[in-house]
Image (cartoon, coloured by chain):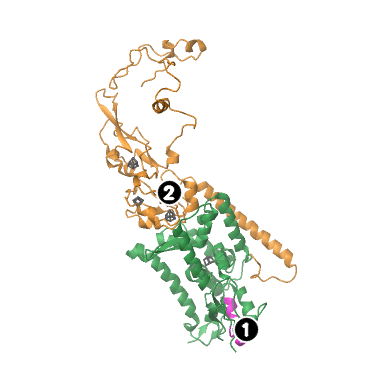
Chain colours: A green, B orange
Amino acid sequence: MSARSPRGQVSSRSLLARSRWLLARRLCQLGLLALFLIGPLLGVWIIKGNLSASLLFDQIPLTDPLLLLQTLAAGHWPYVTAWTGALIVLVFYALVGGRVFCSWVCPVNLVTDTAAWLRRRLGIKTGRTPDGNTRYWLLAGLMAATVLTGVLVWEWVNPVTLLHRALVFGLGGASLLIIGIFLYDTLIASRGWCGHLCPVGAFYAVLGRIALVRVSAHRRDACDDCMECFVICPEPQVIRPALKGVGQPHPLILSGNCTNCGRCIDVCDRDVFKMTHRFDQRSAQ
Amino acid sequence: MSGRDSQKPASTPRRRFLREALTAAGGGCLLALGAGLHARQASALPAQAIRPPGALVEEDFLAACVRCGLCVRDCPYGTLRLADMLDPVATGSPFFTARQVPCEMCEDIPCVKACPTGALDRSLTDITKARMGLAVLSDQESCLNFLGLRCDVCYRVCPVIDKAITLETRHNPRSDRHAMLLPTVHSDACTGCGKCEKSCVLPEPAIKVLPRKVAQGALPAHYRKGWEEKARNGESLIGDQLRLPVRGFDGTTAGRAATETVVAPATPAAPIVATPQAASVPHASALNSRWKP
Ligand code: SF4
Ligand code: SF4
Ligand code: SF4
Ligand code: SF4
């Protein structure tokens, strides 16, 4: 069976072969949601709470480090439980990649990926995309606002925690915001929210700069410039340095904005990309 | 905040960067300001929303609570819930509505133990020391006990019965032969659990739990209560020489029993004229303020 690529070309590999990482990712995202939901729905408490903070196996605390940072900025010194949880999460994402949070965990990703897919499918090219650095300004802005007001202002509107809380605790008020993001990404800006605006993603991107697990274009010599990876990548600008050797000799994608989603590995017919670690600078011959 | 990830044309990179930075900064500030204003507006808790036991004062609570819902999950009675985005309570923060599900005052306080951040203060180990809110008998016109009946339900369900809420005996002036037992809340013992509000038999409760900030007044800091100072000091601080005149009485009601009926003075009260001369004639009937004990 041959499959149509994002750019409409016919690929020699099956759709399944071209979707391994995508399927793994969806399984991870939905599986995590299911883990959070079997507690309230079936009374099986593997994990309790939500993405802001949770308790795993009734023992292991987990805290979103950005939330811990916000409480500190607001002038509250949290209990050791919250610190421990944040440390565990920090170490985890420093190992597997900061924005692994975005592509493997965050529920908003399901929404914005759908919007990106729809945009490609319908061939929508309209709109105006904000600068990719806006998210860092927003991150700085929200921290400043937290210091100034002394309360967690961002959590009033944070679509990431809002959506996850809404799903796990059965609240409906977040839906308007999420529909807004979906329409924005579909009609106005390609990859607008996750790729340019989201300060949560920006925070994890900063963490991602030291991340261990990285994608490498280790067979970049085999690249035939089909551009499939650039089309499918949620952060296409991160590929060029590694694939084309612009400003760096090695084939590693070291930008913190790479989400380690593995879509480039999926779509490449030439098997150029692989998942590896940041010290693996080798290129295949 | 480096521009490493964005591709910029080589021409006028500096101007382009400046423009982008300004746009982004403007947008960011606007968004942050909007969120900040929203937060400020919502920092006053609406009257019917009560925070869980051990919650820090509202401003500190909104700085500390990460809205994880672990307290909600560990409450065995389903008392607590997280605020939805359109609720008047800060998005995602835990609260309860007493009339729906009150706090059952668990001895082991699982909600406080569950909180990872300290938004619920673990120094609260005795649930009777919790101060979630304060019950107020806000509608004396509807309260059945104030109407002279014996309902007492709020009094009897109170987990801190006879300390947080007492029945105070008063003469019933309408029947002139019965007592009224008035439910009376004491702020030094009421935990704000909401059991009284929940169980008030009226269609709309006459007793309501309010956030303490809403419910309570405060004396000016320099006020001293004479009787307290006297008790502490052993004798009056200003001595006994000052005897204030009892205004409004002709002297016959002094020392009467609590059950006696107050009879209005036979002479119609003249309007009070606050002249220096009048003030110097303490027992004149012109000064009758129609005050009743
Ligand atoms: S960029 Fe933000 S919304 Fe998008 S996946 Fe990452 S954290 Fe979630
Ligand atoms: S004390 Fe018990 S009933 Fe009250 S809020 Fe906490 S867990 Fe719930
Ligand atoms: S457990 Fe603590 S931090 Fe979490 S929602 Fe409750 S009060 Fe807030
Ligand atoms: S809220 Fe009502 S029931 Fe609870 S302690 Fe106060 S007076 Fe008693």
Q: Quadrant of the C terminus of chain A?
A: bottom right
Are the residues under badges 1 and 2 in a single subunit? no
- In what element is the residue under mark 2? loop
Residue B229: name its quadrant.
top left
Marks 1 and 2 sit apart, C-alpha to C-alpha, by 59 Å
* Pick the front one: B234 or B218: B234
Q: Determine crowd level at label 1: few under 14, some 14-19, many 20+ residues with C-alpha closer than 10 A.
A: few
Tell me residue A178's x, y (percent): 50, 62
Residue A120, placed above or below residue B1: below
Ligand 3 contact, mark 2 (Cβ < 8 Å): yes
Q: Is residue A5 left or right of residue B155?
A: right
Spot the residue most to the front: B234
Q: Is residue B186 left or right of residue B22?
A: left
Task: Identify the residue under disc 2.
Answer: B55
* Pick the front one: A190 or A222: A222
Residue in view at x 42 percent, y 10 percent: B284
Q: Which residues are magenta?
A: A218-231
Is residue A239 rendered magenta in the image?
no
Residue in view at x 55 percent, y 54 percent: A73
The chain holding disc 1 is: A
Task: Identify the residue under disc 1.
Answer: A225
Tell me residue A29's x, y (percent): 45, 70
